[in-house]
Image (tube, helix red, strand yellow):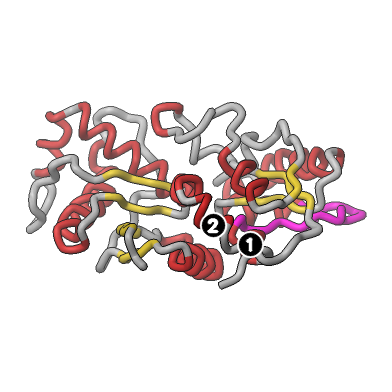
């Protein structure tokens, strides 16, 4: 029974670099009764949210995405737009909030649209963690296996910062912890769960990324965990790069949350 419907924006990085993450996320959502409809001919969201107030052009791609969701909402029967990439979530959520709070910016950006209709601020941007949290009882019914993994949940930066877009406590989030615990997966207390892994500095300053990510991995080992649960393709890449840089490689796996969930549930 498909009694929950969501529109879906995958974004560039997930489609190109994390197809298995996407596949498993959509399989899990389907199994718990959520109908997901991917947007047609979607655009890049912009990857970054521009902080310059007069740099509205950086938000054109995000606005076009929101308009596509608005059009599709009329036929799919929902105004909720799912993202599984934290960076896409961050950009689209912040653009949506900015346009809601500043009608002048919306008017200016609308001038750059070609044939698109005007955006009416009716789309709600969601991240996968929110959807799993709100449907946790359905997910619990699928549990058929136990797992020996000991998990350190790692949220990264962009799903919870700035605070205006956060769906949990930005300093000490528990939503991923609670999802894992609900499925009888052991979770450790992990104070580095929102520390930055270095993000896009992997392009400009690899040394910083290695330093930051190695600190996170060392803390995971100190806490007695053997698995780091991630929700971001870039976080996964940076942590795996750092893991391979150790002289004696720690016995730690870096896995998408969806991979861990798939080990204990029946599809």
Do we see residue 110 in this rendering?
yes
Q: Is residue 177 magenta?
A: no
Give the residue displayed 53% in from the left and 28% down from the top. Answer: 169
Direction from residue 121 to residue 132 in the image, left or right: right
Instruction: Answer whether labels 2 and 1 touch (C-beta < 8 Å).
Output: yes
Q: Which image quadrant is residue 91 in?
A: top left
The percent position of residue 94, horizontal first and vertical second, equals 34, 36
| Residue most extreme to the bottom | 267
Residue at image position (85%, 52%) is 246
State yes or no: residue 254 in magenta.
yes
Q: Dividing the image into 4 quarters, which one contains the N terminus? A: bottom left
**Residue designated by label 1:** 143
The residues colored magenta run: 243-257
Task: Name the spot of residue 247 as percent of width and height, x first.
Answer: 90, 54
Expressed as whole percent of the image width and height from the top left, the position of residue 37 reads 31, 66
Q: Return the residue nearer the eye: 204 or 261.
A: 261
Residue 95 left/right relative to 174? left
Closer to the camera in the image, 130 or 102: 130
Assess disc 1: are there few (<14), some (14-19) or many (≥20) residues with their C-alpha within 10 Å of its C-alpha.
Answer: some
157 relative to 115, above or below: above
> Magenta span: helix, strand or loop, mainly?
loop
**Residue displayed at 46% across by 66% down:** 26
Q: The residue tagged with tag 2: helix, strand or loop?
A: helix
The residue carrying pointer 2 sits among few (fewer than 14), some (14 to 19) or many (20 or more) residues within 10 Å by Cα, namely many
Name the residue carrying label 2: 139
């Amino acid at each position: 029974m498909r009694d929950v419907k969501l529109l879906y924006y995958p974004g560039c990085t997930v489609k190109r670099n994390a197809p298995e993450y996407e596949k498993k996320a959509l399989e899990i959502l389907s199994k718990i009764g959520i109908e997901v409809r991917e947007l047609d001919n979607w655009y890049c969201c912009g990857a970054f949210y521009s902080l310059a107030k007069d740099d509205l052009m950086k938000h054109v791609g995000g606005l076009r995405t929101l308009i596509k969701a608005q059009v599709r909402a009329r036929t799919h029967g929902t105004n909720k737009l799912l993202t599984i990439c934290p960076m896409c979530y961050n950009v689209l959520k912040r653009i949506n909030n900015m346009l809601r709070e500043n009608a002048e910016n919306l008017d200016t950006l609308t001038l750059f649209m070609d044939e698109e209709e005007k955006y009416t601020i009716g789309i709600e941007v969601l991240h996968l963690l929110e959807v799993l949290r709100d449907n946790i009882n359905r997910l619990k019914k699928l549990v058929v296996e136990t797992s020996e993994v000991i998990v350190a949940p790692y949220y990264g930066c962009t799903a919870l910062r700035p605070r205006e877009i956060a769906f949990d406590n930005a300093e000490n989030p528990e939503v991923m912890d609670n999802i894992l615990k609900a499925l009888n997966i052991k979770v450790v207390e992990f104070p580095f769960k929102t520390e930055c892994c270095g993000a896009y500095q992997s392009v400009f300053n690899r040394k910083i990324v290695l330093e930051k990510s190695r600190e996170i991995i060392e803390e995971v080992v100190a806490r007695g965990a053997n698995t780091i649960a991630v929700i971001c393709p870039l976080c996964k890449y940076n942590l795996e790069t750092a893991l391979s840089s150790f002289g004696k490689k720690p016995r730690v796996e870096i896995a998408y949350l969806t991979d861990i969930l798939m080990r204990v549930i029946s599809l």
